Amino acid sequence: MTVFLLPWSHSRFISAAVSPPCCRLLPSSSEKMGDKRKKTFMFIRLVSAAGTGFFYVKRKSTKGLLEKLEFRKYDPRVNRHVLFTEQKMK
């Protein structure tokens, strides 16, 4: 049995078999930490139909919405409400 005498060591951590909590290793990648969840939403870009290049960013649920979203929103570059259609984020 090896004894380490370090300034931060406590009497319960002096044997080589037990290391202090600050020196313990993290679990290896082979140990299963848990499954990742599937994303429930995605970000989309709503682009102005006026052709100004102005866009809004929205979250869209990935469950059940198959058609493209269209909104009538304000475009400050033409000072009007125009149609905004969905495009995927780049």
Image (cartoon, rainbow, N blue to C red):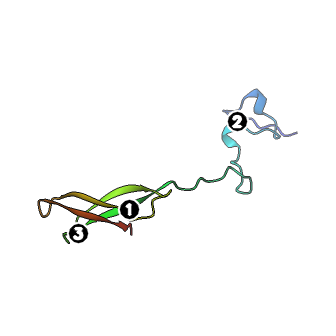
Going from the N terminus, do you reach mark 3 or mark 1 first?
Answer: 1
Instruction: Report which quarter residue 50 is drawn in.
Output: bottom left
Q: Is residue 12 left or right of residue 70?
A: right
Q: Quadrant of the N terminus?
A: top right
Residue 35: x %, y % from top left: 66, 53
Say which amino acid is labelled 1. Answer: Ile
Residue 22: x %, y % from top left: 66, 39
Q: Is residue 85 left or right of residue 88?
A: left
Residue 56: x %, y % from top left: 28, 59
Q: Is residue 72 above or below residue 3?
A: below
Mark 1 highlights which residue? 44
Q: Are marks 3 and 1 in contact (CB under 8 Å)?
A: no
Mark 2 highlights which residue? 6
Which circle marks residue 49 in the picture? Answer: 3
Q: Is residue 85 left or right of residue 30?
A: left
Say which amino acid is labelled 2. Answer: Leu
Going from the N terminus, do you reach mark 2 or mark 1 first?
Answer: 2
Disc 2 is placed on an element classified as: loop
Disc 3 is placed on an element classified as: loop
x 66%, y 33%: residue: 8
